[in-house]
Image (spheres, helix red, strand yellow):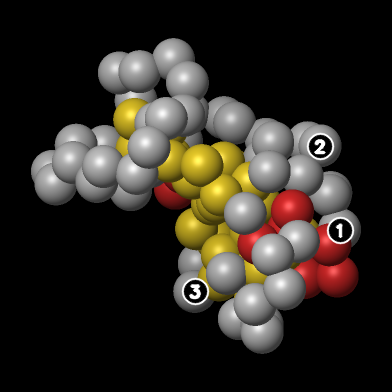
């Protein structure tokens, strides 16, 4: 997943792109009952989480209709996976 154009702005679209390891392609998993990112990747099945982009704005992956975007945390179900 890639934040299109590396735009660190509200409602920036998520696209598929070749891997280049830019901040716009880096995400942290944060479980809703833990205050910070998981230090090492250990996916916990059935446990709700958000995906936080690593650009300066630390926006969350958000479902908007049939698309994905990044938005500031708003505690909506569209940001919970």
Lateral position of residue 64 relative to residue 71, left or right: left
Q: Is residue 46 visible?
A: yes
Quick check: marks 3 and 2 in contact, CB under 8 Å? Answer: no
Q: Observer-nearest residue: 77 or 49?
A: 49
Q: Tag 2, which secondary structure?
A: loop
In the rendering, at what x and y percent does residue 64 appear? 55, 61
Above or below, 72 relative to 6: above
At x 64%, y 46%, the residue is 53
**Res 13 visible:** no
**Which residue is tagged 3?**
66
The residue drawn where x is 57% and y is 69% is 1
Q: Which residue is mark 1?
A: 7
Left or right: 80 as drawn, with respect to 20: left
- Mark 2–mark 1 Cα distance, whole angstroms, equals 10 Å
Q: Please tell me whether mark 3 or mark 1 is closer to you in this view.
A: 1
Q: Residues within 10 Å of mark 2 (few under 14, many from 20)?
A: few
> Residue 9, how many percent across, how many down?
84, 49
Circle 1: element type: loop
Residue 33 in the image: above or below residue 66: above
Label of residue 56 in the image: 2
| Badge 3 density bin: few <14, some 14–19, many ≥20, Cα 10 Å | few
Is 45 in front, or is 13? 45
Q: Position of residue 46 (x, y in %)?
A: 13, 43
């Amino acid at each position: 997943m890639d934040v299109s154009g590396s735009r660190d702005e509200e409602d920036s679209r998520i696209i598929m792109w070749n891997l280049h390891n830019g901040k716009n392609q880096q995400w942290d998993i944060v479980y809703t009952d833990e205050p910070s990112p998981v230090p090492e990747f250990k996916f916990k099945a059935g446990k709700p989480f958000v995906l936080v982009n690593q650009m300066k704005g630390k926006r969350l992956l958000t479902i908007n209709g049939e698309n994905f975007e990044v938005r500031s945390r708003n505690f909506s179900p569209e940001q919970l996976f």
